[in-house]
Image (cartoon, rainbow, N blue to C red):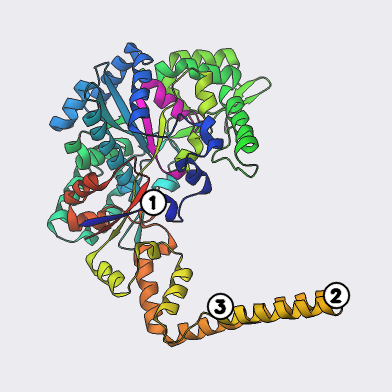
Amino acid sequence: MKANHIPFLETGFFSPLVCDYLKDEDQLRPYHSGVPSFDSLFKQAQVKEKNFPASVRKSLCVALGEQYKGLEMGPAVTKNLELLADTKTLTVTTGHQLCLMTGPLYFIYKIISTLKLCRQLKDKFPEYNFVPIYWMASEDHDFEEISAFVFKGKKFKWNNGYGGAVGKIPTSGLKPLLSLFTQELGDQVNAEALKKIISDSYEKATDLSEATRIFVHSLFKVYGLLILDGDHTALKKHFTPYVKEELEHQACEKNVSEQIKELKKTYNPQYKPQVNPRDVNLFLLEEGKRHRLMKGENGFTWEGNDSVLSGEKISKWLAVSPEKFSPNVLMRPLYQEVILPNIAYIGGGGEIAYWLELKSYFEYHNIPFPLLILRNSALLINPKNARKVEQLDLTLKDLFLNRNSLINKKVRQISNIDLDLTPFKKILATQFDALGALVDQTDRSFEGAVKAQKVKQFKGIEHLEKRLLKAQKVKLKDQVERLVILHEQIFPGGNLQERVDNFSDYYIDHGSDLFDFLMETFQPLSKEFSIIEG
């Protein structure tokens, strides 16, 4: 395998907001903790070290110990669990939903970015320890988002009517789907290894949280990844004051709404928030259900509940059963930073976008706001397609053109006639300049008619240019079709591969060597997109 890189900003696949963040635009600086760099991460480590309570660290270590019970941890995970008890240990975190088979490829890239940054930080700052954390979003309830994955262009979907926190979904109903999938994997050495991981996780676990923990642990335990499920009573107890504040004063909605207004005022009037806050940004967990809490004049209620709970009664519920209260997408980052000695969050563009709504909310609670790092991204090109790219004389930047632009560029490139009518446009412009001078010397009332004729003539030339291009596409039909097939294989549906394909498509060819190569290749602070051939 070999890797090349282009800047994120040149791919055309990232939002203007994320591009502005990467460029460190002045207007966005009030809404984050600074551009991620080794120096800023070191300063963040010093801040977090001073502001992370020993009692929370102790509960965190106990909770992780309980969650790893029964798993063969391996030396790297064992070491990191021990290091976590040290006050000189900080974390770098990424989070993701419990997608079946990890979902799209970018899940793998998130974790490897996190692992790599921790290694780099330890090399740079040996006086500290840095532990990689994968935060399982086990309390999410959007089953549709996690229920499918794509392998070799085929979609495998789990049909399940469960409506509560996804981590509690029993995995007993997965067997028929997994049987179909494992048949598709084939019998290569790496395919057999993947089948064993599936058997040990999804087929033996009781619920999706347990299955995901075992599956991800099997893939990454050699690198020391720690997997944390925030759905834990002892950890929720440390978050109780913040939940109480939300119930009584709705601090999240007030602070986030104000920050959204400021972003529109000082950054971009057309700014659209990634996530809009609700009046109460909490859910209530029950067996098989996750209810959105709503506040009315007389207290709290939720869908399907006929009664209203007073503020006093719901506070008593919180004191007795903090595990029943679940933060939503805007409060979860605060929960994460309250219970982790965290210095940075690594996420995708959408995650960076909603974190940029939260800084004032963190300041309200006096919790250090972490550095935000855009995860690494990659495009994996197999040897067959790499040869086609070379034969078609495509550059790396060409690959990232949208399909129609790429086809037009290639047709012009391989045509034996010149499809560019720019010389004719230049001649036409010269002629109309001369005609304009003539109008100036005669009757200026003709000026409007001349301008109208100029526009008409240029539109005519452009129309002819498009007709010529279209005709050449028909003439070069075979080459165009080959290009379309290649582009579809590399960018399925015109999307980034990492947002569609599952890692297993590539794991069966490369096994853990793929992860090792990505660990070597990725530079989490580089702001570069990797193109990997092999």
For the magenta stretch, what is the residue range? 327-349
Location of residue 437 with respect to 177 vertically, above or below: below
Label 2, on which residue? 444
Q: Amino acid at mark 3?
A: Thr
Residue at mark 2 to residue at mark 3: CA–CA distance = 29 Å
The residue under the point 31% across, 42% down is 171
Given residues 491 and 464, the one toward you in this image is 464
Q: Earlier in the sequence, mark 2 or mark 3?
A: 3
Residue 398 in the image: state x and y as whole percent.
39, 65
Q: Which mark is residue 7?
A: 1
Q: Secondary structure at mark 1?
A: strand
Q: Amino acid at mark 1?
A: Pro
Label 3, on which residue? 422
Quadrant of res 227 = top left
Circle 2/circle 3 CB separation < 8 Å: no
Circle 1/circle 2 CB separation < 8 Å: no
Location of residue 135 with respect to 412 vertically, above or below: above
Q: Closer to the observer: label 2 or label 3?
A: 2
Q: Secondary structure at mark 2?
A: helix
